[in-house]
Image (cartoon, rainbow, N blue to C red):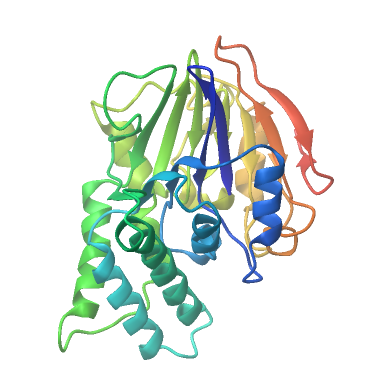
Amino acid sequence: MILLRWDENGSSRAALIDAYSPTGKVGSLVKWLRGIGVGGFTFVAVTHPHLDHLFNLDGILSAFVGNVEYAWFWPGLNQAAYVMYFNKLARRFPNSPNMLGTRAAAVSAFFNECDRQFYGLQLGRPVLLPVRALSRIYPVAGASNGMDVLCISPWEDPSMRFISLVGSGIRAGGVVTDTHRESNLVSAGFVVTYGASQVVLGGDMEEANWRPLLQSCDCPIFSPCVVKVSHHGSSNGRVSGMWGAAGFLGKDRPIVVVTPWNQKLPEAKVLDEIKSSGCDTYLTGQQRHRVEEGLSRIHIRVHEDGRRPDVVFLAPSVKRIQ
């Protein structure tokens, strides 16, 4: 879960990128959010349909009903098609180790809660929209006012590959395949610009999306002061040369945050690459045991004038490794 907070025109704003609660309860998360002054979200964004990015997010939306302006989700097909696909997938593979039934329920719950707030309660929010590469999700329209969020993934070819897999499973008589890993093909990534500072949030972007981004003539100029490493530090979550002796993409030495997954990621060789780049690197604790109580949390303050960020808070489970 990535929480963004900033001041704009004298008011405090917040945005949420992904969320995960393994217990089915979000009370502790909501209490923590309210305790630090979050009363709603300018936007909520779900990078892609994996449980560790959206499980029980509907509960957070419900807790802040009427105070969520936009909800963004991965691209490709509409919400009804994804609900149909994941439910069909769960029925086809009831004994899958990928918790397909739980994932189908989480996807349905997220979309249903958005529909309830937008249509059922007639609140006019949240507005539910799909992301796409090189689109701006904040502000949605008009000039930037010091804070700008650009979507940098997914790109056309990976998106179409995932759409094809989903479409073949929905089609009458079509073959439903367990596309658990392929959901990363549509993972969004974001570049947050705050004044003179830039933050890169990699989601579960893999090489299939990093490469077309970096090869595009419209690729933003990267000079981040903070990088949240994509796909938990896997070898396919980066391209060759991303971490080198001169830093990230050979330009900068940002503060780097790596989030483990299931005691399998990050890969040691990727951590070695990041450490050898000279970046100040932090490794959070295993998320599934610490989300509700004692959040494995790192708080980084980014300055509008481009000064190096400050690490304000580290939970005991967060380790500095460089």
Foreground pick, 41 / 238 = 41
Q: Is residue 168 left or right of residue 39?
A: left
Can you tell which quarter of the image residue 153 is in? top left
| Identity of the residue drawn at 23% across and 26% down | 217
Rendering coords of residue 282 (x, y %):
71, 38
Foreground pick, 32 / 117 = 117
Q: Quadrant of the C terminus?
A: top right
| Identity of the residue drawn at 36% across and 81% down | 87
Position of residue 29 relative to residue 243, above or below, is below
| Identity of the residue drawn at 53% across and 17% down | 10
Q: Is residue 263 visible?
A: yes
Rendering coords of residue 262 (x, y %):
65, 65
Can you tell which quarter of the image residue 35 is in? top right
Q: Is residue 287 left or right of residue 46?
A: right
| Identity of the residue drawn at 65% across and 20% down | 309
Foreground pick, 282 / 140 = 140
